Image (cartoon, grey):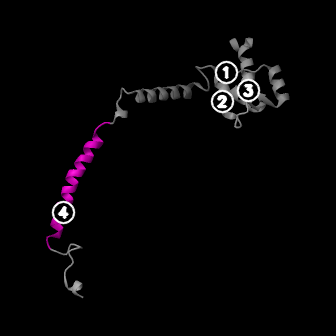
Amino acid sequence: QSHAAQPSTRHGASDDAPDELQRLVGSVFKTEGAAHVAQTAAPSAGAVPGSKAAAKRAEAAAAAAASATSGNGSGQDHFLSATKACVRADSTRCGSIDAADLFRLCAQYKVEIPPEKAEAAKKKGRVAYTKFIDELRVLPAAAG
């Protein structure tokens, strides 16, 4: 009962509590807030325009823009691009994919397949893509 008769200072019931609270809050925000602003305003090491990371990002963006405008495998070795696409398509990493998938990827990367090689691959069903594309690379039609 004696607790109920006394005013609670815990909840700021005294008259000067709001002023004291304002003073404390103001001093906290003035010191910590200023330090925080100074830290965030300073550039980080990764944001330096001449850094290697910035150069790599710019190079990757330029390469992406070039590939977006010129199609799959252009400006590169079409055979290598097709082989890499076959590896990505080979979920089991066994070294072979279905002939239909191989034909689709070769067409996407502008690798021409002679009709006799296409027929042989269709008969097999699954094709060892690295060997197949390497054989296409040395054919006379690939040189042109």
Residue 85 disc label: 2
Q: State which tag comes first along the sequence, 3 or 4.
A: 4
Q: CA distance from mark 2 to mark 4?
A: 65 Å
Residue 144 in view, yes or no: no
Q: Residue at x 34, y 30 (%)?
A: 48
The answer to which of marks 4 and 1 sits earlier in the sequence is 4
Residue type indicated by callout 2: Ala
Q: Residue furthest left?
A: 16
| C-alpha gap between disc 4 and disc 1 | 72 Å
Label 4, residues with CA under 10 Å away: few <14, some 14-19, many ≥20:
few
Which quadrant of the figure contains the C terminus? top right
Local SS, label 1: helix
Image disc number at residue 79: 1
| Structural crowding at the residue carrying mark 1, measured as other residues with C-alpha within 10 Å and reported as few (<14), some (14–19) or many (≥20) | many
Q: Residue 69 in the image: state x and y as whole percent.
A: 55, 26
The answer to whether the residues at label 2 and label 4 have Cβ atoms under 8 Å apart is no
Describe residue 47's horizontal placement relative to residue 119 as left or right. left
Q: Is residue 46 magenta?
A: no
Residue farthest along the bottom direction in this orientation = 1
| Contact check, label 1 and label 3, Cβ < 8 Å | no
Judge from the rendering whether residue 7 lies leftward or rightward of residue 83; answer left or right: left
The answer to which image quadrant residue 10 occupies is: bottom left
What number is the disc on residue 30? none
- Residue 142 image point, x, y percent: 70, 15
Sequence-wise, which precedes: disc 3 or disc 2? 2
Looking at the image, residue 22 lies above or below residue 100: below
